[in-house]
């Protein structure tokens, strides 16, 4: 389960404006940097706004739960 969240986070980051390339090395780095819970929180970061704008926590949670 831990690996799944980190893989999802790597793919999520690949869609952001900064354009981190998805690959196994990125997944390994994310496993070192983020706990499972931290990866879950990072998955809530929006990827649609460039540059990123502030988004209320409630909005991020409603998008994840909705």
Image (cartoon, grey):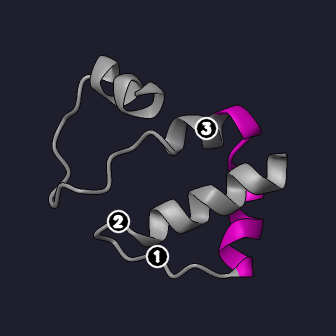
* 32 inside magenta stretch: yes
Magenta residues (range): 24-37
Indicate which disc, 3 or 1, sits on the residue closer to the N terminus.
1
Locate residue 42 relative to residue 49 in the image: left or right.
Answer: right
Position in image of residue 25 (x %, y %): 72, 79
SS at circle 2: loop
Q: Magenta stretch: dominant SS?
A: helix
Q: Is residue 25 magenta?
A: yes
- Label 3 and label 1: CA atoms lie apart by 18 Å
Query: Residue at the spot x=35%, y=65% of the render?
Result: 16
Name the residue tied to disc 2.
Answer: 16
Residue located 69% across and 32% down the image: 37
Question: The C terminus lies in which quarter of the figure?
Answer: top left
Q: Nearer the viewer, residue 32 or 40?
A: 40
Q: Dot 1 lies on which element?
A: loop
> Which residue has dot 3 on it?
40
Q: What is the crowding at mark 1: few (fewer than 14 residues within 10 Å), some, or many (at least 20)?
A: some
Rendered residue at 59%/65% (across/down): 10
Residue 47, by quadrant, is bottom left
| Numbered mark located on residue 20 in the image | 1
């Amino acid at each position: 389960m831990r690996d799944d969240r980190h893989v999802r986070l790597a793919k999520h980051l690949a869609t952001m404006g900064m354009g981190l390339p998805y690959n196994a090395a990125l997944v390994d780095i994310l496993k070192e940097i983020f706990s499972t819970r931290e990866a879950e929180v990072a998955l809530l970061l929006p990827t649609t706004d460039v540059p990123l704008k502030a988004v209320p926590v409630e909005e991020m949670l409603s998008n994840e739960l909705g």
